[in-house]
Image (tube, rainbow, N blue to C red):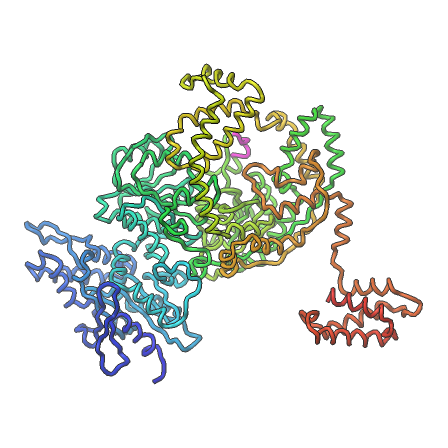
């Protein structure tokens, strides 16, 4: 018998679910497995229904009688319920499939009532038993014929208590041109439109060709259908092909227990940007992650956990699912769920996600006192707030056990003392951190703050970059590094600065301080000539590669003023409405700057909505810090990056481009700064080193008492209870010499490092008063970090910046080799956590940057520039390799640059050969050197091929061709000429 979709896939699905083999002549059922209650196969002709009916009303009536005492007493009441359900089915053409599905779900979840109680009292009606699954019937059929506008025959339909909850489409496994997508298309675009009544009660639909299994909710676009993975299978990067694997996934996804869990706790009805109603069901990582949170809270023993799911894989929805299931869980006795974010824009995003999904009992706190009032009043709701609102919270504000805190972007909410304050206010709460980019450093460690020691690897759920790409949850990232040539006129700057110093009557100390402050990376990057060249390149690149495909772009600049600079340049190439600057302004900004560029929260939301509208004229958003996190714009495909960003911040930023969108195959980062090496490092993760750091942190606890005692020992005899200037004066008098101040500073800095590393551990609570006192004393005696007064900087800083800009000259922007940051590359780095792996990537980028030169002591302004990375402003962290090489270029004088350019300038093959012949020219060499070179060039180009230098046959052919060319001009006997010419050919061809 030949293989086809019926006998090899559809019948396989039936066999896996029910144990019935439809390919056998005798259909005796085998045990279907141990995944919850068993499905029973019923042939379509035995279902006792007409072709126009989708409910198996006999089974449904039996369930209503079985599950509802009031209906059991009066079985005729079941007909009234079925009448109501039929009305929902009939209304689908008028209300739409999603709204009809939402209404039917209320019935299925037991949220609807009927006047069946005594005195016509309304009582809930149960269609399904969620507590005792054995009380439900589970039927599977195939070739289920349904007629509405036309007749359609879905391959597999699954019923719970006579209600169709799953539709599946099987495709042939033996035709390469047919895939699961064909089946998904048939379900979504044909069946849902032709026979929508069948999908009014639908939990999910699936499609498979026997190689991959994908599933989706009603009306879900095909690019958002998702694969299902098994529990404990998060680390598998490749799935074995074949029916066996599909069988396991079918068993797992379609078990009654899981389907009913998705129905009750993981189905959201929300509104999209166009105010259209949509349905969302979970991807497997969201389902597993949320359930692990719920399980941990139910067990009650471990009070924390870390969810590490890569950027773009849906952590916001995971929190909605978890919060919804926690609130529904009767074992938890009406818990309080607190969702914590650490930025206002994230607060808005999370609130919007919860509110759009109509999750009941959600409170968003506007201020600290409101949050504290909610907790003190023992509010039993979902509370969305920011970590900063726990500032000054009182200890033991609420000591209930059933408070669950979900901390979003946990790598950034590295909390410190805020985290301890929160833990002290809610001492018995469960605290879970969710992050896409955990931080693994001694002073800021996501694992230390949230990871439970019982969890292998420090996390309770992990979904990696390569897994998200494998499952098509996110897109791969393409990097396009682009080198901006920069030349620094060192001598002119030196002389100009000396003149400037004399004119301004600066002493050496003031001049040195001015050097430090003006020789910043931002001043260098914002050279008008450099910005103009980059914007020209952006305009060309966007028009050629981005705009024709209907995508949009983001430009990330060094600072707020650079945003304005880029905007003005961009307006030379595009209409003004094509780009918008999104920055925050401060009270100290000039009025004109605030008036021109300040935007409030509502204006920012409008800009984001306009950017997400494919039909709008807005093509670019220009930012420096805003919208690099908590910004979801699937239409954003390309990021033009001209700012140093590192570690988790870099990953968050570049992953703005990895969201799924129609016809979008990847996100693109056009890198003008040189962050690709840092992107690779940020994705590198060594669990061994992480465990080592956590071990070290544990050891640090033992050092804390002695460190505190050492810092306090400088103030023996000082009454620390005295407040105000009297107390401060006593403390300062105890360390009244430079030597004493230095000794105290050394001890306090060590203590402060310990404190940062251990926070938010509650061990610090007992030391809090002493540490606060010491830190205040330290600040009062610490020398000003800035050796130059603010007034002097404002008076002269602009002039020094102009001096730099006038003497920086920018060459072209060169496209370097592009890179695809895909699953295989990252997997290699993850599996081989050796620094050499990252170095390989770095070398590809920096090989063009390698220069030679000494590093003198940095004193003058130009020398400060040569160490731009080390002297960058706080918060502007550079990519080490790139900036180091960039600074070496900046250090060279104009003369040295010219010589270096001449050395590294690539010669064309013909130019190289011409130079050789002119160099070796003798009386016997023909005068027509140009013709000789052209002949050699022509004949070698015919016979050579890529990699010929590494093959014997290639070398032989090229040597033979060279001999022939030289023979024509009677030069074939000149061995020196032949050897030198062949060497040039080997190098340049």
Q: Quadrant of the C terminus?
A: bottom right
Q: In this view, does 60 lie above or below 844?
A: below
The answer to whether residue 981 is left or right of residue 462 is right
- Camera-side residue of 793 and 616: 793
Q: Quadrant of the N terminus?
A: bottom left
Q: Can you tell which quarter of the image residue 877 is in?
A: top right
Question: Picture coordinates of residue 49 (x, y %)?
Answer: 18, 72
- Camera-side residue of 153 and 755: 755
Q: In this view, does 26 lie above or below 623?
A: below
Residue 903 visible, this angle: yes
Rendered residue at 29%/38% (across/down): 428
The answer to if 592 sits in the magenta stretch is yes
Question: Picture coordinates of residue 47 (x, y %)?
Answer: 19, 73
Question: Picture coordinates of residue 390 (x, y %)?
Answer: 36, 34
- Camera-side residue of 834 and 603: 834
Outermost residue to the right: 923
Looking at the rendering, the stretch of residues picked out in magenta corresponds to 588-594
- Camera-side residue of 736 and 546: 736
């Amino acid at each position: 018998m030949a293989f086809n979709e019926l006998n090899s896939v559809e019948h396989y699905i039936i066999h896996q679910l029910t144990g019935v083999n439809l390919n056998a002549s005798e259909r005796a059922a085998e045990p279907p497995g141990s995944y919850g209650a068993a499905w029973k196969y019923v042939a379509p002709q035995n279902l006792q229904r007409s072709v126009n009916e989708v409910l198996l009303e006999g089974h449904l009536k039996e369930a209503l009688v079985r599950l509802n005492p009031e209906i059991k007493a009066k079985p005729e009441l079941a007909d009234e319920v079925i009448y109501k359900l039929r009305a929902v089915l009939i209304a689908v053409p008028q209300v739409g499939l999603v709204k009809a599905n939402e209404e039917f779900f209320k019935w299925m979840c037991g949220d609807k009532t009927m006047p069946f109680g005594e005195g016509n009292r309304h009582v809930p009606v149960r269609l399904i038993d969620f507590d005792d699954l054995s009380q439900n019937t589970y039927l599977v059929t195939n070739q289920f014929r349904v007629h509405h506008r036309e007749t359609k025959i879905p391959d597999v339909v699954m019923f719970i208590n006579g209600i169709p909850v799953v539709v599946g489409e099987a495709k042939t496994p033996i035709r390469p041109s047919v895939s699961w997508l064909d089946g998904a298309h048939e379900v979504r675009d044909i069946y849902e439109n032709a026979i929508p009544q069948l999908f009014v009660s639908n939990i999910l639909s699936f499609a498979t060709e026997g190689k991959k299994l994908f599933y989706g909710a009603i009306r879900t676009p095909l690019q958002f259908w998702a694969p299902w993975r098994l529990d404990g299978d998060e680390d598998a990067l490749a799935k074995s092909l074949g029916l066996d694997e599909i069988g396991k996934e079918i068993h797992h996804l379609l078990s009654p227990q899981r389907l009913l869990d998705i129905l009750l706790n993981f189905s959201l009805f929300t509104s999209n940007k166009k105010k259209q109603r949509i349905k969302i069901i979970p991807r497997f990582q969201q389902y597993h992650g949320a359930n692990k949170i719920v399980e941990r809270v139910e067990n009650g023993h471990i009070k924390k956990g870390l969810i590490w799911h890569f950027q773009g894989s849906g952590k916001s929805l995971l929190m909605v699912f978890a919060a919804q299931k926690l609130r529904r869980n009767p074992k938890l006795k009406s818990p309080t769920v607190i969702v914590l974010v650490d930025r206002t824009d994230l607060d808005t995003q999370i609130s919007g996600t919860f509110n759009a999904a109509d999750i009941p009992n959600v409170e968003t706190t506007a201020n600290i006192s409101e949050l504290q009032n909610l907790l003190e009043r023992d509010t039993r709701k979902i509370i969305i707030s920011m970590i900063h609102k726990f500032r000054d919270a009182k200890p033991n504000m609420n000591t209930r056990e059933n408070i669950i805190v979900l901390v979003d972007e946990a790598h950034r909410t590295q909390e410190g003392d805020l985290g301890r304050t929160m833990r002290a206010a809610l001492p018995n709460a469960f605290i879970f951190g969710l992050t896409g980019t955990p931080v693994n450093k001694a002073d800021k460690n996501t694992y230390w703050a949230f990871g439970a020691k019982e969890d292998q690897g420090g996390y309770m759920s992990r979904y990696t970059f390569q897994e998200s790409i494998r499952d098509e949850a996110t897109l791969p990232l393409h990097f396009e590094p682009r080198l901006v040539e920069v030349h620094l006129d060192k001598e002119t700057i030196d002389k100009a600065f000396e003149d400037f110093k004399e004119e301004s009557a600066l002493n050496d100390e003031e001049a040195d301080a001015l050097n430090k402050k003006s020789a910043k990376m931002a001043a260098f990057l914002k050279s008008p000539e450099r910005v103009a060249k980059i914007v020209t390149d952006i305009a060309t690149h966007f028009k050629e590669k981005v705009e024709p495909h209907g995508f949009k772009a983001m430009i990330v600049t060094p600072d707020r003023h650079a945003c304005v600079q880029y905007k003005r340049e961009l307006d030379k190439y595009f209409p003004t409405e094509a780009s918008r600057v999104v920055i925050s302004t401060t009270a100290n900004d000039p009025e004109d700057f605030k008036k021109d560029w300040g935007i409030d929260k509502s204006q920012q939301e409008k800009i984001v909505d306009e950017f997400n509208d494919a039909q709008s004229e807005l093509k670019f958003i220009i930012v420096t810090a805003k919208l690099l996190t908590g910004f979801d714009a699937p239409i954003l495909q390309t990021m033009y990056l001209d700012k140093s960003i590192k570690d988790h911040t870099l990953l968050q930023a570049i992953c703005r481009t990895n969201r799924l969108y129609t016809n979008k195959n990847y996100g693109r980062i056009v890198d003008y700064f040189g962050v690709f090496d840092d992107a690779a490092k940020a994705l590198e993760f060594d669990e061994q080193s992480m465990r080592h750091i956590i071990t070290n942190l544990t050891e640090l606890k033992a050092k804390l008492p002695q460190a505190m005692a050492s810092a306090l020992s400088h103030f023996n005899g000082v009454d620390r209870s005295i407040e105000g200037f009297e107390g401060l004066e006593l403390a300062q008098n105890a360390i009244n010499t430079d030597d004493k101040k230095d000794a105290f500073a050394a001890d306090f800095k060590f203590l402060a490092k310990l404190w940062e590393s251990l926070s938010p551990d509650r061990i610090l609570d007992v030391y809090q008063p002493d540490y606060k006192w010491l830190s205040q004393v330290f600040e009062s005696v610490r020398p000003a970090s800035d050796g130059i007064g603010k007034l002097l900087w404002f008076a002269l800083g602009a002039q020094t910046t102009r001096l730099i800009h006038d003497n920086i000259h920018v060459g072209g922007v060169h496209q370097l080799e592009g890179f695809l940051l895909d699953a295989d590359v990252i997997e290699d780095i993850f599996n081989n956590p050796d620094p050499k792996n990252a170095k390989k990537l770095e070398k590809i980028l920096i090989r063009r940057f390698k220069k030679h030169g000494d590093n003198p002591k940095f004193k003058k302004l130009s020398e400060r520039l040569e160490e731009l990375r080390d002297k960058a402003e706080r918060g502007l962290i550079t990519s080490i390799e790139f900036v180091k090489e960039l600074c070496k270029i900046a250090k060279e004088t104009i003369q040295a640059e010219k010589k270096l350019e001449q050395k590294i300038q690539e010669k064309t093959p013909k130019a190289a050969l011409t130079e050789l012949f002119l160099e070796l020219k003798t009386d016997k060499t023909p005068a027509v050197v140009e013709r000789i070179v052209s002949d050699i060039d022509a004949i070698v180009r015919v016979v050579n091929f890529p990699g010929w230098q590494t093959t014997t046959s290639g070398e032989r052919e090229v040597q033979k061709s060279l001999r022939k060319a030289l023979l024509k001009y009677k030069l074939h006997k000149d061995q020196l000429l032949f050897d030198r010419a062949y060497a040039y050919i080997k190098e340049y061809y």
